[in-house]
């Protein structure tokens, strides 16, 4: 493993996030992974769980930002699905097929990683007519910067959707026949 690479662990320590959780938590994503997070998980991964200190166990059982596992893949897929549903409700057509049922034993293969990128681009294209300034790109050797960018891209799409919704009112399109 290169130092800056995030290891992909097929473990779902956090469970999955439902659409109602996303709405309640204002679109939770992780966009602040650091090199230190990767070092921390690499150190913890070299030990048996029973040998960890209470502080290390708390870190291991919390949000593990230095690794990319099933909960991260599910969060991204659920965010894509949620954004597609929001756009559909607003009258936009976006065809996405995100995988939202990653399990501990699953491993993301290239076609699945390409689908994540394609779904993100489709969502952005539906909102703005372009594919945006960031393309998740090379997902094969996933580093913490790329992992941050994937979720930042989705967060930006969500924020753009919120701005778009606010624009309806100012353009006189809030209620039919109002103007």
Image (spheres, helix red, strand yellow):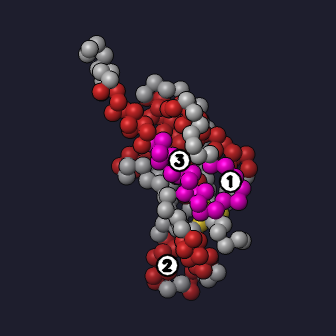
Quadrant of image for the N terminus: bottom right
Seen at 44% across and 34% down, the residue is: 86
Q: Residues within 10 Å of mark 2 (few under 14, many from 20)?
A: some
User: Where does label 3 land, which residue?
Assistant: 153
Q: Examine the image and state in which quarter residue 179 appears.
A: top left
Residue 58 picture location, percent across and down: 46, 76
Q: Earlier in the sequence, mark 1 or mark 3?
A: 1
Seen at 51% across and 51% down, the residue is: 152
State the residue in front, 10 or 82: 82
Mark closer to the observer (3, 2): 3
Seen at 61% across and 57% down, the residue is: 146
Q: Which residues are magenta?
A: 136-158
In the drawing, what numbered circle is on residue 115? none
User: Where does label 2 land, which residue?
Assistant: 57
User: Is 116 situated above or below 31?
Assistant: above
User: Is 177 situated above or below 37?
Assistant: above
User: Where does label 1 land, which residue?
Assistant: 139
């Amino acid at each position: 493993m290169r130092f800056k690479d995030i290891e992909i662990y097929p473990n779902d320590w956090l469970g999955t996030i439902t659409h109602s959780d996303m709405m309640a938590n204002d679109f939770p994503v992780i966009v602040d992974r650091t090199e230190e997070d990767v070092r921390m998980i690499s150190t913890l991964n070299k030990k048996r769980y029973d040998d960890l200190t209470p502080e290390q166990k708390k870190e291991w059982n919390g949000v593990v930002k230095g690794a990319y596992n099933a909960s991260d893949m599910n969060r991204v897929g659920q965010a894509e699905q949620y954004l597609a549903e929001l756009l559909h409700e607003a009258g936009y057509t976006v065809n996405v097929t995100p995988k939202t049922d990653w399990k501990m034993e699953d491993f993301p293969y290239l076609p699945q990683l390409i689908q994540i990128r394609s779904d993100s681009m489709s969502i952005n294209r539906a909102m703005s007519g372009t594919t945006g300034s960031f393309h998740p790109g090379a997902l094969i050797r996933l580093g913490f910067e790329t992992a941050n960018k994937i979720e930042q891209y989705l967060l930006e799409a969500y924020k753009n959707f919120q701005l778009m919704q606010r624009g309806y009112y100012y353009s006189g399109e809030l209620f039919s026949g109002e103007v």
